[in-house]
Amino acid sequence: MKTSILLLRLGGVVNLLIGILHIGFWGLFDWPEELAKLSVDNSNIVQMLNLFSIVFFFYTAFILIFMPGKLLINTAGRIFIGMFAVLYLARLAMEFYFPNGSIGFAIFMVVTISFFVLPLSKTKNLSYAN
């Protein structure tokens, strides 16, 4: 159980780091110049999706870091954990679907997926809450 909690907290740290990375997208990808090439609607959609992603990753990081045991003991929590396994598995697939994929990033995704899959495979109907 302690290993599962540690893995989920590591998954939370990954979500926190991804949220921080998304904050930097405007500068990293030169969005002021690049998004100006899009229509106003498309530029707004890209920026709104990114802002939504930031909120999502910070919120879920909080839950994963501070309440991992509660996620493991009930069906809704286990579905929440499974959602991350699917989310990061889809992101791994996209790494190879879209051009300029990175093997290093793909390996990072496999490790991240394990943070969610392993706790699900190790716990069953527990009454432990953390």
Image (cartoon, rainbow, N blue to C red):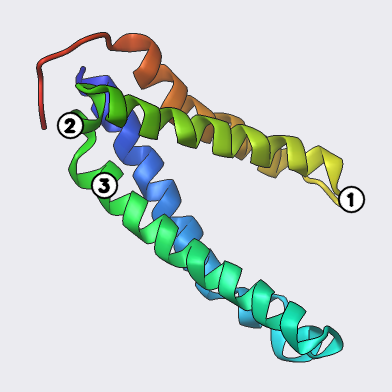
Q: Residue at x 79, y 91 (%)?
A: 36
Q: Which label belongs to residue 70? A: 2
Query: Which element type, helix, strand or loop, lies under badge 2?
Result: helix
From the image, tell me which residue sits under label 3. 63
Q: Position of residue 1 (x, y in %)?
A: 21, 17
Mark 1 or mark 2: name the one nearer the start of the chain. Answer: 2
> Number of marks in the image?
3
- The residue beneath circle 1 is 99
Q: Amino acid at mark 2?
A: Lys
Q: Is residue 30 visible?
A: no
Q: Marks 3 and 1: which is nearer the front?
A: 3
Task: Work out whether residue 120 or residue 21 is closer to the camera in this orientation and state it.
Answer: 120
What's under tag 1, amino acid-wise?
Answer: Pro
Going by the image, does 48 lie left or right of 77?
right
Q: Which of the two labelled residues, at mark 3 and mark 1, occupies the earlier sequence position?
A: 3
As helix, strand or loop, the secondary structure at mark 1 comes to loop
Answer above or below: position of 6 versus 53: above
> Quick check: marks 1 and 2 in contact, CB under 8 Å?
no
Going by the image, does 128 lie left or right of 33? left
Q: Position of residue 106 (x, y in %)?
A: 69, 37
Disc 3 element: helix
Is 106 above or below relative to 123?
below
Callout 3: few (<14), some (14-19), or many (20+) C-alpha neighbours within 10 Å? some
Q: For the point 19% across and 45% down, which residue is it? A: 66
> Which residue is at 63% across, 81% downward?
26
Of tags 1 and 2, the one toward the viewer is 2
Q: Residue 28: which quarter of the image?
A: bottom right
Q: Nearer the viewer, residue 28 or 117?
A: 117
- In the rendered image, the quadrant that contains the C terminus is top left
Mark 2 to mark 3 CA distance (whole Å): 9 Å
Which three-letter amino acid code belongs to the residue tagged 3? Ile
Determine the CA span between mark 1 and mark 2: 39 Å
